[in-house]
Image (tube, helix red, strand yellow):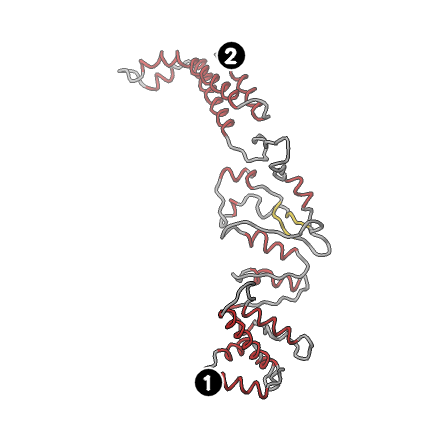
């Protein structure tokens, strides 16, 4: 009876091979699978008809029924059904694009819709070969695809469970040496997408040049400061909003009142504070906005050119205190500025 399954089994095997090679259709593979399953059922059907009346009959135990099974029929039947089920799972399994046996990309005869393809890992290693000896590089990721890791098919990923990581975190890094292109990188990931862990921190540990880091969460600095100071030899300056009195800077300190460009620098700072005027605007609103800008310029210039104030007293905080001065005191202050100020 087992020989009767060889034909359908051969047809199913050929269908699966052609399906994996993208030569035959899925229907061909299914035809072989269903043919094998039908042949297996027909092989075991006479034996089931013979033993079924004895099941549950008085005086006949289940063990006696099992002992009476004709193995020459049962084994081919069970084996054929198992092979048919395995073939069905193989055909219906979803594979990611780019992996072996996955659906091939459809290509048009022209490039009207582009001609890009998924970058395979071999080409990725060539393109992102490693850091430049002079200045390092930008970390793109790991030379590793988590969807091709056998562990990804058996367990669910959990950041807290190292057993679910697979080779993640141990594979060689893909580092752009920044020899061509814009050398910019942009990461698209939602909150909690491990952007800092996978790109931000590795890049700051690899990039040997200077870096300006905007870190509102204040988590990157503590992780990379010691390395960049001790290993890379950099001077790290941290501006922490939570410790403004300890780590803040005086944004007016760069204005040199002895420079011929001091007036334009003051105008630039005022422009940062008040924002630029939109083109085409007019009317009373623009008049009052211009008057306010002139007032801020006057108060800031007097503050910077004041010979009595120490350098640490010439700050935006001091300018803010002047701006909230009551009206009568403001008039007195403006009169003093007009008569005695060192700013002109």
- Residue 328, label in figure: 1
Residue 306: quadrant of the picture: bottom right
- The residue at the far left in this view is 58
Mark 2 and mark 1 lie on one chain; the one further toward the N terminus is: 2
Residue 208: quadrant of the picture: bottom right
- Residue 3, label in figure: 2
Say which quadrant the C terminus sits in. Answer: bottom right
Q: How many residues crowd mark 2 within 10 Å: few (<14), some (14–19), many (20+)? A: few
- Residue 231, label in figure: none
In percent of the image, x 67 and y 40: which residue is there? 123
Percent position of residue 267, x then y: 61, 73
Instruction: Work out whether 182 lies above or below 209.
Output: above
Instruction: Work out whether 52 lies above or below 329.
Output: above
Disc 2 versus disc 1: nearer the observer: 1
Give SS at disc 2: helix
In percent of the image, x 48 and y 85: which residue is there? 329
Percent position of residue 188, x then y: 55, 49
In percent of the image, x 63 and y 66: which residue is there? 236
- The residue at the far front in this view is 283
Percent position of residue 283, x then y: 50, 68
Instruction: Work out whether 340 lies above or below 241.
Output: below
Asked whether, in this view, residue 284 is left or right of residue 64, the answer is right
Q: Nearer the viewer, residue 13 or 288?
A: 288
Tally of numbered tags: 2
**Do the residues bearing badges 2 and 1 touch, measured as CB atoms within 8 Å?**
no
In percent of the image, x 46 and y 14: which residue is there? 39
Give SS at disc 1: helix
Report the Cα–Cα distance between label 2 and label 1.
110 Å
Q: Nearer the viewer, residue 115 or 279?
A: 279
């Amino acid at each position: 009876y087992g020989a009767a399954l060889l034909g359908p089994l051969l047809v199913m095997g050929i269908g699966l091979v052609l399906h994996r090679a993208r030569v035959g259709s899925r229907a061909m593979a299914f035809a072989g699978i269903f043919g094998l399953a039908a042949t297996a059922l027909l092989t075991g059907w006479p034996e089931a008809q013979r033993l079924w009346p004895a099941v549950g009959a008085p005086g006949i135990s289940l063990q006696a029924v099992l002992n009476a099974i004709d193995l020459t029929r049962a084994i081919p039947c069970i084996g054929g059904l198992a092979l048919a089920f395995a073939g069905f799972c193989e055909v219906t399994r979803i594979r990611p694009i780019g992996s072996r046996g996955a659906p091939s990309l459809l290509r048009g005869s022209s490039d009207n819709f582009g001609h890009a393809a998924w970058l395979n890992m071999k080409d990725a290693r060539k393109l992102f070969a490693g850091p430049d000896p002079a200045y390092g590089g930008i970390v793109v990721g790991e030379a590793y695809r988590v969807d091709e890791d056998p562990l990804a098919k058996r367990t669910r990923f959990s950041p807290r469970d190292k057993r679910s990581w697979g080779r993640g975190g141990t594979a060689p890094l893909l580092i752009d040496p920044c020899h061509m292109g814009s050398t910019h990188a942009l990461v698209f990931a939602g909150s909690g997408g491990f952007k800092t862990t996978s790109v931000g921190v590795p890049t700051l540990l690899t990039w040997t040049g200077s870096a300006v880091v905007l870190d509102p969460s204040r988590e990157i600095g503590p992780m990379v400061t010691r390395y960049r100071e001790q290993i890379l030899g950099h001077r790290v300056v941290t501006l922490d909003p939570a410790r403004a009195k300890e780590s803040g800077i005086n944004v007016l300190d760069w204005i040199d009142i002895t420079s011929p460009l001091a007036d334009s620098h003051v105008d630039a700072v005022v422009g940062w504070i008040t924002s630029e005027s939109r083109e085409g605007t007019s009317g009373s609103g623009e008049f009052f906005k211009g008057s306010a800008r002139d007032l801020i310029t006057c108060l800031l210039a007097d503050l910077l050119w004041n010979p009595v104030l120490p350098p640490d007293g010439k700050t935006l905080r001091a300018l803010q205190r002047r701006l909230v001065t009551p009206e009568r005191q403001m008039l007195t202050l403006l009169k003093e500025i007009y008569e005695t100020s060192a700013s002109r």
